[in-house]
Structure formats: C-alpha cells, structure tokens
Image (cartoon, rainbow, N blue to C red):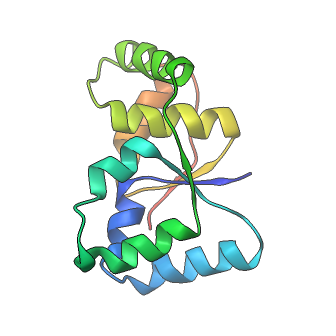
Amino acid sequence: MGVTYDAGALIAADRGERRMWARHGALLANRAVPTVPAPVVAQTWRGGGRQALLSRLLVGCAVEALDDDQARRVGSLTAKAATTDIVDASVVEGALRRVDLVISSDRSDLEAIAAAIGQSLNVEVP
C-alpha cells in the first residue's frame, strides 16, 4: 500500500505541523514515496518564498500528472459522485487505482466519492 497526499496534508506540512512532518519523514526513511496528484499541488501552491516548507515536502513526493485518460476517469467519477470537485475526485481515482492510504483533512468528501462507485477508501488525518 502506498500513500497519497491530499490538500490537507500539504497544508499541514506548509504550516509546519510536527505530526505531518514526522509521518512524511517515516515514509521517506522506509523508502516510500508519497504521491501528490498535480491538481492538489495547484490547489495549495501560492508561490513565493513563504511556501518553503511545502516546497521541501514536494521534493520527497511523486507529483502525478493528470493525463488525458486519467482526466476522463476523474470526469466520470465526478459525474457518478454528483460532485464538481475534480481535485477530490483525482485524489480518489489515483488512490483507488494504486490502493493507497490517503492523508487528508477531508475524509467525508473523499469517502463519499469512493462510495459512489461502490468502493471504500482508507483515509487518515494529517
């Protein structure tokens, strides 16, 4: 099982929350590379030097691009879940495909999207 970071995980890291940094450090020590969907980076990135912690976190992650095939799967998933949140849907689509644990502060929304297609998602708070 891998790990996918949602926006809540990136925000926690950017705020310097020790629990998130400890979890990230443990993953890297075990040679596990967390995945961050590109739409999550876009949702959280504001640029500039004030996001040095977030920048440092992303160096240790695999940022997953949203290609055409995945974009279509995400679009279908948003329709089935009756949501317009493509960021959350991209997190769910990728995590289900990779069988990842998701680190997020948005547990209920992510679980609802997965449930819309009869799947369950393992979500933990940052």
- Percent from the top left, x then y, of residue 73? 51, 18
| Residue 120 image position (x, y, % from top left) | 58, 34
Residue 13 visible in the snapshot: no
Name which quarter of the figure residue 9 lies in. bottom left
Q: Quadrant of the C terminus?
A: bottom left
Would residue 122 be found to the left or right of residue 30 on screen?
A: left
Viewer-nearest residue: 62 or 81: 62
Whether residue 58 sits left or right of residue 33 in the image: it is left
Q: Residue at x 30, y 17 (%)?
A: 82
| 50 up-or-down from 63: above or below | below
**Closer to the camera in the image, 33 or 1:** 33
Residue at horizontal 72%, vertical 65%? 32
Residue 63 falls left or right of residue 104:
right
Residue occupying image coordinates x 57% and y 36%:
94
- Observer-nearest of 13 and 102: 13
Residue 39 coordinates in the image, percent (x, y): 38, 42
Examine the rendering and report whether any part of residue 89 can be seen.
yes
Q: Position of residue 113 (x, y in %)?
A: 42, 29
The residue sitting at 61% across, 59% down in the picture is: 34
